[in-house]
Image: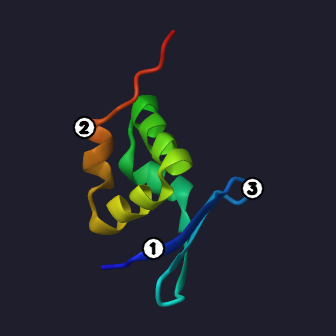
Amino acid sequence: MVYVKRCEYDLDTGKLEMEDVDGVRYSIDVYAVEDLCADTMYERSALDYLLYNKPVEYVNLLLAGELRNYVRQNPIYLAD
């Protein structure tokens, strides 16, 4: 299990930069994750919400292989 020490999303590159407690740094391509995990705009909105508001939870779900299940169960419905 990876314990996240620092996590930050870089909007310019579309990468989620994280560092674990051992000092190992990871760079996650958010656009590739969205393409694999989300099919609708509502599911992408759920991913965006996690990314901007709870990036550590986003990483933990991704590393556990549960991110796709999360967006299927928690889509965000946008008001018209």
Amino acid identity at mark 1 = Val
Give the residue furthest to the right: 12
Residue 11 % position (x, y): 69, 53
Residue 5 % position (x, y): 50, 75
Callout 3 environment at 10 Å: few (<14), some (14 to 19), or many (20+)? few
Q: Are circles 1 and 3 on residues that touch, CB within 8 Å? A: no
Q: Secondary structure at mark 2?
A: helix
Q: Please say if 40 is above or below 67.
A: above
Q: Which residue is mark 2?
A: 73
Give the residue furthest to the top: 80
Q: Which residue is mark 3?
A: 12
Q: Which mark is on residue 52?
A: none
Residue at position x 33%, y 42% in the image = 71
Residue at position x 30%, y 50% in the image = 68
- Of 3 and 78, the residue lying toward us: 3
Residue at position x 48%, y 13% in the image = 79
Callout 1 environment at 10 Å: few (<14), some (14 to 19), or many (20+)? some
Q: Secondary structure at mark 3?
A: loop
Q: Are circles 2 and 3 on residues that touch, CB within 8 Å? A: no
Q: Which residue is mark 1?
A: 4
Q: How is the image coloured?
A: rainbow
Q: Secondary structure at mark 1?
A: strand
Q: Are circles 2 and 1 on residues that touch, CB within 8 Å? A: no
Amino acid identity at mark 2 = Gln
Q: Please report whichever mark, 1 or 3, sits nearer to the chain's N-terminal start.
A: 1
Q: Please say if 64 is above or below 23.
A: above
Residue 48 % position (x, y): 51, 42
